Image (cartoon, rainbow, N blue to C red):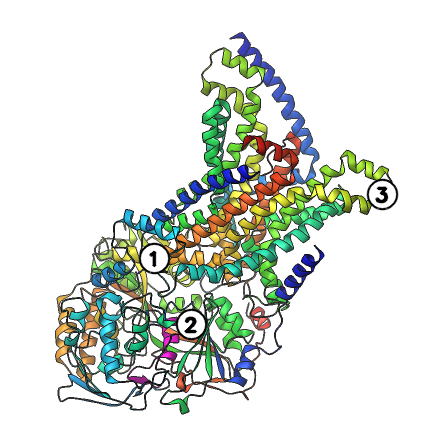
Amino acid sequence: MTTEVITDIAQAEQGTSLWQDAWVRLKKNRLAVCGLIVLLIMVMTALLTPWIAPYAFDAQNLDLGATPPSAAHWLGTDIFGRDMLTQILYGGRISLAVGFIATTVALLIGVTWGAIAGYVGGRVDAVMMRLVDILYALPFMIFIVLLMVVFGRNMLLLFLAIGAVEWLTMARIMRGQVQSLRQQEFVEAAISLGLPTSTIIRRHLVPNALGPIIVYTTLTIPGVMLLEAFLSFLGLGVQPPQTSWGLLISYGADTMEEYPWLLIYPGLTLTVTLFSLNFLGDGLRDALDVRGSRD
Amino acid sequence: MTAFRQLITAVTVSGLLACSAGENNVERGNREGILYFGNGTEPQTIDPHVLTGSPEGNLASALFEPLIARNPYTLEIEPGVAERWEFNADRSVITFYLNPEARWSNGDPVTAQDFVWSWQRALNPKIGNQVADVVFYHIRNAEAYHLGRIDDPDAIGVQALDAHTLRVALEYSNPFALLKFTYVYLAPVHRATIEAHGAPTDRFSPWTRPVNFVGNGPFTLDEWKMQRFVKVKRNPYYWDRDNVALNGIVFRPIESSTTEEKMFRSGQLHTALNPPNSKIPDYRAQSETPLVEGPFMGIYYYMMNMEHPPLDNGRVRRAMALSIDRETLARSVLQDTVTAWSSYVPFGMPDYEHTHILDFDPEAARRLLAEAGYPGGAGFPALTLKYNTAENHRSVAIAVQQMWKQHLNIDVQIANEEWRVYLDSLDQHNYDIARMGWVADIYPGSFLDTMISTGGTNRTGFANAEYDRIILEDLRATPDKDAQMQLYQRAERIFLEETPLIPIYAYKTKRLVQPSLQGMPANAGDMLNYKYVVLDADAPAWKWQTPADNRQAAN
Amino acid sequence: MWRFIGSRLLQAVPVILAVITATFFLVRMAPGGPFDSEKAVIPEVRAALEAQYRLDQPLASQYFAYLGDLASGDFGPSFKYPGRSVNELIAAGLPVTAELGFYALLIATLIGGLAGVLASLKPNTAQDYVPMALAMLGICMPTFLLGPLLVLLFGIRLEWLPVSGWGDLPGDKILPSLTLGAALAAYIARLSRAGMLEVLSQDYIRTARAKGLPEWQVVTRHALRGGLLPVVTFLGPAFAGLLAGSFVVESIFQIPGLGRFYVQAAFNRDYTMILGTTVFLSTLIVLFNLMSDVLAAWLNPRLRAQYGSSA
């Protein structure tokens, strides 16, 4: 009992200073701060889209048709006379949601899997990680295309499919972390106290591996968003009437010669968002001093 | 190591910059008499009894010749393998007299026995001919044999009286019967060649490879590189070779119409079909535009599932049909590349009087919807409009969705499905409203016949006893063409009054044609006859004029 | 070493078998069959077609028959193209895809390697920031955006290069190779910069410098070999990834390669073709990964020792 309290306090102190240090270091990294700000703006606009979008999502003006950017339509209109800024805002909601949700799926599976493998060790670990190795070897891009063709038109499946690919790296990282943490005294103490495994994993191991988890989560989100955009581009991801940046880019690419603004603005938005996420992720990696697995 | 490095450099530089002469395909083609033809997708096959699609048809038409041909300008029929033909008194039997000069590309004569054998092969259930019901069933016992109800191929109403006389007995007399003998699906195939490369009904047979191939068309197969090109060259034995101007054709499979248009613009193709709609205004603005437009026999429509409430209510179906502003749709979304059209038999059908009871009328639509129990759209259940994944279908669906919202205040969801999944949904009647198109020939039966209650394109649940009787009994007992037209008009009226589907527009041909290319006019059958195609090497080269200034001015 | 290779090869077998099985049953679960068309297919015709393609047999026996064919190297006949075998289709597409992948890899290695090395020589200066920012752009700009943008700029606006095709017009291979290679170049730039930085801080480099060797000789003679090691081991999986990822580029530029065949086959429910391309590409990817592991083990003495003992 006492030991647990003490270790908790010790961790808390260590944790606080660690996080404060990291924050100070992160603030010095101008690119990462810019990324963070851009990202916050993106998330805010996505949350507030229904209130701040200049037009209704499905408002058409067939007689107007496709027009280049103007005072009334800052980013122009598509062939239905729909406001492009509005489309990008609503598309951003989906793209970001897919990015965050699918990453969460990957995170949950990966962390659980990796933590169990790393903690239990031995034969269980060997079997679990061999499975990860096998899955790594599968050509997933090909499988996702096949899955989406076969079952199509299903957001849930999209999350699952993307999450299923991205959890592998997370599992490997988590396993490595847990393996090294397991050797440490406070974990040994917790084990000797007879705490249930689940409690040890939840309260001791995961919090201490938080740094790498955060870093790789930040770096996974852009990968996931890219994958969503890629599937949508092939017509296999998000389906109309919903829209996403990938879908907008796909439509824009069809008519880029006549209406280049329909390609350039969604493309720019996606690129800037991915840029921000990557810079933030790199910054966090430096700030939290996370090294290790290269992917 | 150095040698290896040099090799890599050499391979890379020469590969990336692989140079050819400065002449483009169109110029070279004009000089050499070779037509460069943008042909959509990679042809699946050239076997006339297996093929179904239009790129395959375009290619096979160069390689095979049926009994009769059509003039691409007038669509009048003219001799093919048959130099003349005659009907018996009640027009139920046709006798074709084959041209004794007709030859296969290996020099063998084309005989009446070739046709008998070919059609027996085409109708053999084992080969899995998917268009036989549309193109063969007018021949006596063709249906029975094709569906396996009789086993004797000699019972089919085709007989060789001698080497050059072919007698065809029809199931019923029909003033349009001759048209079907112009289809490439009814072309003969070379028996000895097919038998040399496997069973006659084997779909996998390699007889269609250039080294094995024997055909009877104006051209014969020269070279086939998958996904790159198919080359055909003159058939030296073709009976009418003196009237064939081209030395060969290169068919290029280019899946994306955007790419095909760009290739046309850069002089790599003599002709490209279906340039993207967004480019059409720019093409129309060109002086001496290479864009050829004209109506052809195709209709684009939304089927309604009559088993799904509230679409089981005729008033609801009618209201939905009346609330589509087709003119605006055609103009704004489709750049007038189609004809706004509210009836099922398409615009341009010769000698036919159209019914227009479904024209845009939002007042009447609202009234009907109120009568059906949904005043102002109140309480209208959520319906889904399905389309197969394609840019054009999406555009139409988005605009129509908005029109229903605006004029009837009803919410219809739109959803797309990938083509195979989509067809499966339709077959299982798993849809509320679904888009479909039908392209056929210049007689009304090619549209209305398949809409009988058991028809292959009728997936709506439409079943009307009077309609079926007109198609299956009255028309078959009426050999007179004018009387047939009257009957078809009556049938179409019944059909439109019940409104199992919403006609949206009639198709137009839109083809890009270089000025040097002549003999490929737009025609209502959207059909090609390569014999008429001439390349004029002296024609002025066409150059794209960038219409950017026009466009900005317009905005 | 041989034991290591052998065990990795043995490991690859269940992976490939899993791919075959999963694909086989996944494809059959898909709604819609290869013979559907605008007009409902007459049941008698459908039965005849299914008989020709063995589809009338129970699924299990179809599966084992397929495995049997595969064992003898036969991918079966294509559904979509009667008269063609899947082997033939793969043989037609593979050289194109391989050529595209080769150019892309070459461009990526040259540009990426150069940028990374340059950046590492003067860290935290403009010579570092500019190439690294460009590399980040390469990572963030998806292929399907970069491709159309390059086409818009060089193909349509400037009219310098052809917008599509493969081997039809002079220079038509440049834009696709560049598009496919860009993201890879970015990764290589980052990898080689990191690798170089690590090596440059090591003792033997300091020794070399202390000996008074000119800086360019220090770099070319000593640093490059160690610094680019991570890049070398990265190339195997990268090339495999290029093969699988080329279908976007092949679609954008209308290139008749394996990737495009695969996507078309998936849409057309060409069962044998989907299976054939998936199995073929998967095997290739697995083999490339294997090769790069072996290469890494062979190049890195520490890893070599580790694998030698564990395998």
**Is B61 one of the magenta-colored residues?**
yes
Task: Read off the chain for label 2.
Answer: B
Identify residue for label 1.
Answer: B420
Q: Is residue C38 above or below residue B245?
A: above
Name the residue type under label 3. Leu
Identify residue for label 3.
Answer: C213
Q: Left or right? Give the position of A236 relative to C199.
A: left
Res B336 label:
2
Name the residue type under label 1. Arg
Place residue B118 in its image quadrant: bottom left
Q: Left or right? Give the position of A285 relative to C94.
A: right
Magenta residues, as a range? B54-71
Category of crowding for the residue at label 3, using alpha-carbon neighbours closer than 10 angstroms: few (below 14), some (14–19), many (at least 20): few
- Residue B174 position, x and y percent, is 18, 81
Circle 2: element type? loop
Residue A74 appears in the rendering: no
- Residue A273 position, x and y percent, is 58, 45
Rounded to the nearest whole Å, what is the CA distance between mark 1 and mark 2? 29 Å
Point out the tag, 1 or 2, that comes first from the N-terminus: 2
For the residues tagged 3 and 2, is the chain the same? no
Task: Read off the chain for label 3.
Answer: C
Residue A176 appears in the rendering: yes
Circle 3: element type? loop
Q: Left or right? Give the position of B87 relative to B201.
A: left
For the residues tagged 3 and 1, is the chain the same? no
